[in-house]
Image: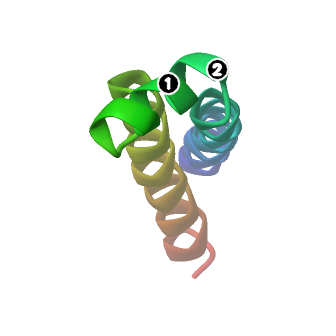
């Protein structure tokens, strides 16, 4: 059961990372980067959330293999 949850977290994190990379390369993010120097908040939250979920899922999978 724990491995299934960890695999789901890892898969969800990867999906969020992909969405974050796509959002950071969008026209809105390019305009935001031109005026503020950083991508949109949405892109940043997708990337941060994806990194956290991926790390939690990977940690759960590696810890549960003992």
Up/down of 42 relative to 59, above or below? above
Up/down of 41 relative to 59, above or below? above
- For disc 2, the marked residue is 27
- For disc 1, the marked residue is 31
Tell me which corner region of the image, top left, top right, bottom left or bottom right, holds residue 36.
Answer: top left
Q: CA distance from mark 1 to mark 2?
A: 6 Å
- Residue drawn at the location 57% of the way across and 63% of the way down: 58
Left or right: where 17 falls relative to 29 = right
Return the residue nearer the eye: 18 or 37.
37
- Which residue sits furthest front? 35
Tell me whether the residue at label 1 lies in contact with that at label 2, contact meaning CB atoms closer than 8 angstroms. Answer: yes
Q: Secondary structure at mark 1?
A: helix
- Which residue sits furthest left? 36
Q: Position of residue 32 (x, y in %)?
A: 41, 27
Q: Position of residue 38 (x, y in %)?
A: 36, 43
Left or right: where 8 falls relative to 32 = right
Tell me which corner region of the image, top left, top right, bottom left or bottom right, holds residue 5.
Answer: top right
Tell me which corner region of the image, top left, top right, bottom left or bottom right, holds residue 56.
Answer: bottom left
Other-residue count near label 2 (Cα within 10 Å), few / some / many at <14 / 14–19 / ≥20: few
Left or right: where 15 falls relative to 56 = right
Q: Secondary structure at mark 2?
A: helix
- Which residue sits furthest top? 28
Q: Position of residue 65 (x, y in %)?
A: 63, 75
Up/down of 46 relative to 61, above or below? above
Q: Position of residue 41 (x, y in %)?
A: 33, 27
């Amino acid at each position: 059961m724990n491995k299934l949850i960890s695999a789901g977290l890892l898969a969800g994190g990867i999906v969020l990372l992909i969405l974050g990379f796509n959002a950071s390369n969008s026209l809105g993010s390019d305009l935001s980067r031109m005026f503020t120097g950083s991508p949109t908040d949405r892109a940043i939250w997708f990337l941060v959330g994806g990194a956290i979920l991926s790390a939690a899922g990977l940690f759960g999978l590696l810890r549960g293999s003992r």
